[in-house]
Image: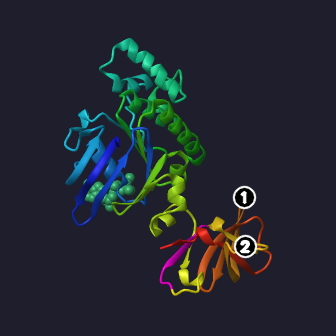
Amino acid sequence: MSYLECNGLKRIFPGKFTLDLSFEMGEDELLCIIGPSGSGKSTLLSLLCGVDSPDFGKIILNGRDITQEPIQKRRIGMVFQDFSLFPTMDVSQNICYGMRNIAKDERENRTAELLDLVGLSGFEKRSVSNLSGGEAQRIALARAIAAQPQILLLDEPLSALDAPLRKRLRTVIRQIHEQTRIPMIYVTHDREEAFAISDRVMIINKGKVEAIGRPQDVYNNPPNLFSARFTGEGSCIPMSLLTEEDSEKLAFIRPEDIKINKTNPSENYIILKDATVVSAEYITSGFFVRLSYKGSELCCYASSQPESETVDLAVKRDRVLCF
Ligand code: ADP
Ligand code: MG
């Protein structure tokens, strides 16, 4: 049975935006939600945690209908981009905030455990205002976990941090999930981050679910063109350029499925002759090459810079996605 179920969940901001979706998640999952800015990610989290109520639909958490339950009763943890720590309290007071019903010495032990979990042992008496962004977010995580939430919702928790720190902390969050087994919904606009840490990703656009599945499945077999484009680079060209048959459809091809001047390509490849090289950008693993073929743009990877202006392309036949 699923742990969290959203059935026909609808939130209407008249004339502006409608969220309308259903999905389920399991008890042991870290589910990442990705989608463009304004797609409804934060709106969905507001409904789940109870700061906003849906106009229609149901939220079932751990077998209980919580749709109308007040926010204090839901035991749902939240971590936001801006950390939202209490500035007048020190680190341990911030963490203990979620443990008000627990005896004092137990609270102290638990605080030490939580600080260890987030890699900040000994930070108990630090002032919150002297923490770096990364440290503040670790404390915000510890505080959210202290309350033993039934589920933890994270809304772009790393967006305010610089790239190397984001990479490090996303690993920490995944490890925390594995150690605590707290189910997590992690919202991000960064697909690489989502792919790196999630069990499954859910892509939303304009308030609707476009795709949900394991990162590798959503990447390799996206159910629609939006999901194909949103999950990574690719070329979108008329299908008629690849087949003799009459087709109005579009083909989507990942850059890694196109090879330049492949020697002895087998029949598993479709050959496109005389594509023009438009640009070749150095990326550390090689080059990212943009090409033009019969009026369409294509892109692929190459281990070295193409030496001629025109090249032949070999497209992996079974990797062509058709929409
Ligand atoms: P995301 O988090 O994916 O960037 P949001 O869920 O914050 O997107 O917003 C989705 C859409 O809903 C936006 O167009 C936003 O302007 C609109 N919206 C959010 N909250 C409200 C509100 N309280 N009243 C009216 N419109 C809102
Ligand atoms: Mg948002």
Numbered disc in front, either 1 or 2? 2
- Residue lying at 26% horizontally and 54% vertically, measured from the top left: 9
Q: Residue furthest front?
A: 267
Vertical position of residue 162 compared to residue 222: above or below = above
Q: Determine whether the residue tagged by mark 2 lies in a helix, strand or loop.
A: loop
Instruction: Report if residue 238 is visible in the image.
Output: yes
- Relative horizontal placement of residue 25, taking residue 12 as reference (left or right): right
Q: Callout 1: 10 Å neighbours few (<14), some, many (20+)?
A: few
Vertical position of residue 93 compared to residue 32: above or below = above
Q: Determine whether the residue tagged by mark 1 lies in a helix, strand or loop.
A: loop
- Is 250 colored magenta in this rendering? yes
> In the image, what residue type sits under mark 2?
Ser
From the image, tell me which residue sits under label 2: 266
Q: Position of residue 309 (x, y in %)?
A: 75, 81
Instruction: Report if residue 54 is visible in the image.
Output: no
Label placed on residue 221: none
From the image, tell me which residue sits under label 1: 285
Q: Callout 2: 10 Å neighbours few (<14), some, many (20+)?
A: few
The residue range painted magenta reads: 247-254
- Cα–Cα span, label 1 and label 2: 25 Å
- Residue lying at 69% horizontally and 75% vertically, measured from the top left: 267
Q: Nearer the viewer, residue 145 or 161?
A: 145
